[in-house]
Image (spheres, grey):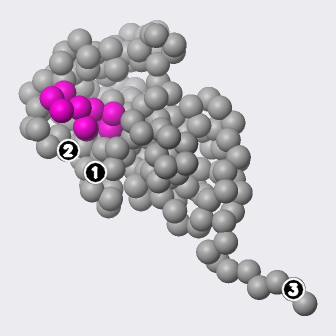
């Protein structure tokens, strides 16, 4: 007699997270955010709203920004995931991280990882994006401290820094 299997049985996926191959057992539908924070102790990616509206949980999947609180972990099978912890190269910050730090574009810092990932994702998707178009794409990243003046300036300068680095 064959065993009865449930759609809730964990599945094993292979993925790359922050340039390290991972083999993970995940329950179908379990959010990527939970796996990153609880199973892999990558706590830089934040839980904000839980429904994909605030941007705090942003990560890069194959270079594109996704909201990890609503993305099932099983969807990253065979893909490359980069969290805020995976951006720096040793002690050298990613250009977007460097600009946010230099500009003081944060207050409490809770949203900062999602903002940094958001800028990188926008520039990866549209390398020439700038000005109002860039700000519009970043509008779904919420800063509860309302530090938008510094953040807006940093977003523009960070996108330019990425373009300079790519040349």
Give the residue pinned by disc 2. 142
Q: Do tag 2 and tag 1 residues touch (Cβ < 8 Å)?
A: yes
Q: Which residue is mark 1?
A: 48
Does 107 lie within the magenta span? yes
> Relative to 58, is 53 above or below?
below
Q: Secondary structure at mark 3?
A: loop
Q: CA distance from mark 2 to mark 1?
A: 9 Å
At a point 35% along the width and 25% down the height, the residue shown is 128
- Is residue 95 found left or right of 109 in the rendered image? right
Tell me the distance, in whole angstroms, between the alpha carbons under discs 1 and 3: 43 Å
Seen from the viewer's position, the closer of residues 64 and 20 is 20
Q: Nearer the viewer, mark 2 or mark 1?
A: 1
Q: Is residue 91 left or right of residue 99?
A: right
Q: Which residue is mark 3?
A: 2
Does residue 12 appear anywhere in the picture?
A: yes
Reply above or below: 163 against 120. above
Could you tell which of marks 1 and 3 lies nearer the N-terminus? Answer: 3
Total label count?
Answer: 3
Q: Is residue 18 magenta?
A: no
């Amino acid at each position: 007699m064959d065993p009865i299997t449930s759609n809730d049985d964990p599945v094993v996926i292979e993925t790359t997270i922050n340039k390290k191959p991972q083999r993970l057992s995940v329950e179908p539908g379990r959010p990527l955010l939970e796996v990153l924070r609880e199973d892999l102790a990558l706590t830089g990616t934040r839980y904000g709203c839980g429904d994909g509206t605030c941007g705090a949980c942003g990560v890069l999947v194959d270079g594109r920004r996704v909201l990890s609180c609503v993305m099932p972990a099983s969807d990253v099978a065979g893909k490359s995931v980069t969290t805020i912890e995976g951006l720096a190269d040793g002690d050298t910050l990613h250009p977007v991280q460097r600009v946010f730090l230099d500009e003081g574009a944060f207050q409490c810092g809770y949203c900062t990882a999602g903002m940094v990932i958001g800028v990188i994702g926008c520039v990866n998707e549209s390398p020439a994006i700038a000005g109002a178009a860039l700000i519009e794409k970043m509008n779904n990243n919420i800063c509860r401290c309302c530090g938008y003046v510094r953040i807006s300036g940093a977003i523009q300068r960070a996108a330019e820094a990425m373009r300079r680095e790519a040349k």
